[in-house]
Image: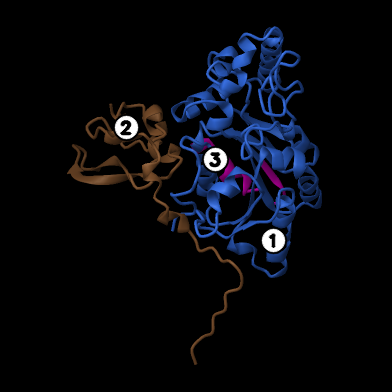
Chain colours: A brown, B blue
Amino acid sequence: MEKLRITLGAVSRPLESLKVKTGDWGAEYPVVIEENCKACGDCVVYCPDLCIELVETGEVDEKGRKKKVAKVNYDYCKGCGTCSVVCRHEAIKMEIKELYKG
Amino acid sequence: MKLFGSGHGACPGCGLPIAVKSVLEGTGPCFVANATGCLEIISSQYGKSAWGVPYIHSVFENSAAVAAGIEAALKALGRKDEGPVVVFAGDGATADIGIGCLSGMFDRGHDVLYVCLDNEAYQNTGNQQSGLTPPGSNTTTTPAGKVLPGKVKPKKDMVSIALAHKARYVATASVAFPRDITRKAKRALEFEGPKYLQIHSVCVTGWGIAGKQAIPVARLAVETALYPLVEYEDGQLVRVRKIKDRKPVEEYLKPQRRFRHLFKHPKGKEVIAELQRIADENAKKYGLDE
């Protein structure tokens, strides 16, 4: 017999917020300058929208470690600029979206 | 699976998600009870939940009691190993509306980590003063005008209140130092019994700053000693964040719209002097100066 499943009332499933793409909120967006990025992870811990992660570039540095850089998920970035402020290596700059120029 | 996800409705630059994700990073999977407030609104709308952990919101005042109930149930069912119980509540829910339930939770000695997200007013409804609003702050219920220069009374000392309840671990943190929040959340869970963690969290709309300024302003609150970062274990002060070259409080007040009037109000100078006195007192009390 098939298992019967009854759901009472309104049930929220985990992480349903992921379907809300907040990337179109801001007027600015961050651009990572990859040669300056030291993959310290500061932007990752500060990002209020949890949309930055460190990804491997595929390159290997002189000590044989895999090189990583910060990558922004523009689906969720609200363009607050926190990452560009906390970056100690001037590796993130904010740019105005095409739509808001002029 | 992430414990707290993207797509929540916080304002750009808001400090709450930084505080929440840093705490969850330290605690790992846990049971979350949330009081009414900004965090509830931005993260738990129907069909848009940002939580990857079991989450409950009841009403404004009872998050501590709800968490106490969850903890007691886990204990009775022998399921304590499934994770700690964590409360997220705002400053209004902690210091004003829910202080009775919080006191009861401390008193009964429940094994709960209570996190107060302190953005210094009822920001969810548009900046009304709470017990944790600092003096001089211009809010809709303490408007700066001809008679008064914003809020008059000082910030409620919730750290001392928690200590007076013999809470086992009491600490303050700031969103300007997220790794510090994670460490404190982790440390708190090493104690069995009630724990209290108060996190200074920036509100960009209520404080009147741009999203970009959020972290620098939060950092200034710590660097001026207006928000001392302290840690008590079993009633003993064990660690403080030392400050190199303490800054005058004006540097913290100037960028914020809620304090703008202090620089032209006839009583403004008195309030700034009072805030500087509070900062000096904090620095002396906790030995913050390096």
Chain letter of the residue carrying label 2: A
Asked whether the residues under the numbered discs 2 and 3 touch, taking CB atoms below 8 Å apart as contact, a structural biologist would say no
Q: Which residue is mark 2?
A: A100
Chain letter of the residue carrying label 1: B
Verify whether residue B189 appears in magenta.
yes
Disc with the residue nearer the chain's start (1 vs 3): 3
Q: Which residue is mark 1?
A: B70
Q: How many residues crowd around disc 1 within 10 Å: few (fewer than 14), some, or many (20 or more)?
A: many
Residue B290 seen in the current view = no
Horizontal relation, residue A52 to residue B128: left or right: left
Chain letter of the residue carrying label 3: B
Q: How many residues crowd around disc 2 within 10 Å: few (fewer than 14), some, or many (20 or more)?
A: few
Label 2, label 1: how far apart the Cα atoms are: 49 Å
On whether disc 2 and disc 1 are found on a single subunit, the reply is no
In the current view of this chain or complex, which residue is farthest to the bottom? A1
The location of residue B258, given as percent across then percent down, is 61, 22
Height in image: B290 above or below B227?
Answer: above
The location of residue B239, given as percent across then percent down, is 62, 31
Magenta residues (range): B179-196
Verify whether residue A94 appears in magenta.
no
Q: Which mark is residue B16?
A: 3
The location of residue B203, given as percent across then percent down, is 56, 33
Asked whether the residues under the numbered discs 2 and 1 touch, taking CB atoms below 8 Å apart as contact, a structural biologist would say no
Label 2, label 3: how far apart the Cα atoms are: 28 Å
Q: Give the quadrant of residue A89.
A: top left
Q: Compare residues B280 and B135 and report the one nearer the observer.
A: B135
